[in-house]
Amino acid sequence: MLGISRGTLRLALERLAANGEIVRRQGSGTYVGRVAVPAAFSEGLEVLESYASLARRQGHSVKGRGVAIAQQRAPGFVAEALNLRKGSTALCVERTLLVDKAPAAHMRDWIHPSVPLPSLERLTAAIERGQMMLDIVIEAGVPVAFARTAIRPRLLEPGEEIGGALGVRRTTGALEITETIHINDGDAVQYSIDVFPPGAIDLHVLRGLGDRELLPVNGRGPA
């Protein structure tokens, strides 16, 4: 009747049951489960705001787990984004972000060598408290002006590093957000890759007509 195979339907029901959207009771039937849990983040992309600030403003607690901070050879795409020579090193900050004690994102930031930063001990403590590198860079007096952001789908596998950090148990779709932070003169000072599992972030964009002149409708201009 639905035009799909029994195998496909069975798999869909299993995933709905695993997420708690339906409850299957043997001998009784299938029932609607809990209401979907609200996303950890609800973000409009028009304003550059750190996830820590966003989460706390929305009443969530944030912490960093598995924090790893080290100078690393920047991958080619990172070196290009930060306008570094091939083979240059940059500080890499990696961690799993916990929102209300649950894994909500895996984050990896590379910072341009010119950015003044606190000591490794203080930086580690700040990241473990849930502070974002954007906040730390701004606190260091860097004149951050804007960010270029790209959003892509990706798959998480339970056996890989990020999938394990986020606690996925099967192949799962996720959102990967890459962002390059620029200062007033256009130079890039930070490159970030953030991976969010399903339900962790709700993105929305407010779009307007800008300064374009309104066009007549049915031969009539604006009143």
Image (cartoon, rainbow, N blue to C red):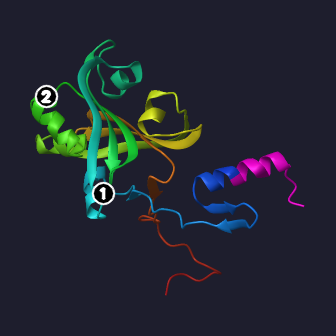
- Residue 9, position as x, y percentages in the image: 78, 52
Amino acid type shown at disc 2: Leu
Q: Answer whether residue 136 is visible to the viewer in this image.
A: yes
Amino acid type shown at disc 1: Ala
For the point 39% across and 45% down, the residue is: 103
Give the residues drawn in magenta, as a range. Answer: 1-13
Quadrant for residue 13, please give it.
Answer: bottom right
Closer-to-camera residue (15/60): 15
Tell which circle, 1 or 2, labels the residue nearer the N-terminal end: 1
Q: Residue furthest top?
A: 87
Q: Answer whether residue 143 is visible to the viewer in this image.
A: no
Closer-to-camera residue (24/67): 24
Closer-to-camera residue (81/104): 104
- Residue 94, position as x, y percentages in the image: 31, 32
- Mark 2 is surrounded, within 10 Å at the Cα level, by few (under 14), some (14 to 19) or many (20 or more) other residues, namely few
In the displayed structure image, the side of residue 3 where residue 95 appears, left or right: left
Residue 181 part of the magenta-drawn span: no
Query: SS class of the residue under badge 2?
Result: helix
Q: Residue furthest right?
A: 1
Quadrant for residue 82, please give it.
Answer: top left
- Residue 35, position as x, y percentages in the image: 54, 67
* Residue at the spot of label 1: 55
Residue 8 versus residue 75 in the image, above or below: below
For the point 60% across and 61% down, the residue is: 21
